[in-house]
Amino acid sequence: MTEEMGFSEEIDLRDLLSIFLKRIGWIIGGAIVGGVLALLFTMYAVTPSYESNTTMMVNGSKTSIGDIASGFDLGSLNLSQKLVITYSEIVKSRIVLESVIERMDLDMSYTQLLNSISASPVNNTEILKITVHNGDPELAADIANMIADVFIKEVMRILQVSNVEVIDAAIPMPMPTNVRPLMNIAIGIILGVMFVVFIVFLIEFLDQSVKTEDDVARYIDLPVIGSIIDFDSVPKK
């Protein structure tokens, strides 16, 4: 019984390999078409988005970045880390972003600007990172720097403190963050191959014609007494 099962599995694997080899041209064609379509989609359908970052140091007890080295005790560090979380929410507040829109005369609403930015602590440190995404790299950097400027002024006005200093101002980044041709081409090739393999399996599944002696035994359950040679397929000497 075990030998029969092993022999049957071996035949099935051979049939599967035979199906793939018979349609190998289809599979290669599907890979090429999938890669080309992915490349065209990347070039013409994806709108490039550029990212620009600015970072700021938040200190709970000092008023300038030059005094931070002398204030690294556990209490002030915990306070500063909590302030970073609080300040990251202030960055996204309406009073800050609407002021940025007004100063830069941006053609966008508060919600649109909010959806294009993020503010978060850097690895649980006292550093606050503001990230801006925009279709124009220059504008992305300008918005990030303006947000930092407005945010610092609002913190000083509302909380009457001066405990935020800019570490790195935002600069334009020439490479878009959402355009990855090689990755998209690889995904397109994989999807193209998967689609062709599905079509091949579907064709073979729907094809119930008898082609070999094994098909006679499998579908009709009758022994094969003899077979006729296809003389047209025999090479002529």
Image (cartoon, helix red, strand yellow):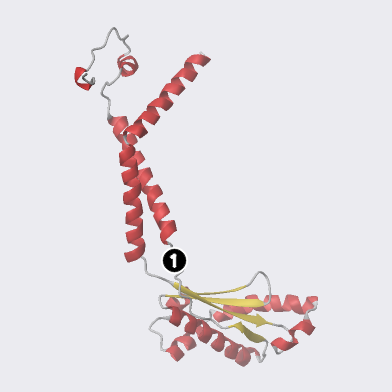
Q: Quadrant of residue 68?
A: bottom right
Measured from the top left, where is residue 41 in percent x and y? 34, 60
Q: Residue at x 49, y 81 (%)?
A: 141
Side of 45 where 49 appears, left or right: right
Task: Please give left or right for residue 236 compared with residue 149 in the image.
Answer: left
Q: Does residue 26 appear left or right of residue 147 in this picture?
A: left
* Residue depicted at 45% across the width and 73% down the height: 50
In the rendered view of the protein, which quadrant contains the C terminus?
A: top left
Residue 45 in sight here: no
Between residues 88 and 212, which one lies in front from this camera angle? 212
Which residue appears farthest toward the left when viewing the image?
232
- Residue 38 placed where, x, y %? 35, 56
Q: Quadrant of residue 59?
A: bottom right
Is residue 172 in view? Answer: yes
Q: Quadrant of residue 61?
A: bottom right
The residue at 42%/65% (across/down) is: 179
How many circles with numbers are drawn on the protein? 1
User: Is 236 drawn above or below residue 57 in the view shown?
Assistant: above
**Callout 1: SS:** loop
**Of residues 140 and 21, the one drawn nearer to the viewer in this rendering:** 21
Image vertical order of residue 188 relative to residue 230, above or below:
below
Query: Does residue 102 sit above or below 56 in this rendering?
Result: below
Residue 118 percent across, percent down from the top left: 53, 74
The residue that label 1 is drawn on is 178
Q: Nearer the viewer, residue 29 or 1?
A: 29
Q: Residues within 10 Å of mark 1 (few under 14, many from 20)?
A: few
Amino acid type indicated by mark 1: Asn
Q: Residue at x 31, y 45 (%)?
A: 29
Viewer-proximal residue among 158 and 236: 236
Rendered location of residue 140, percent (x, y): 46, 79
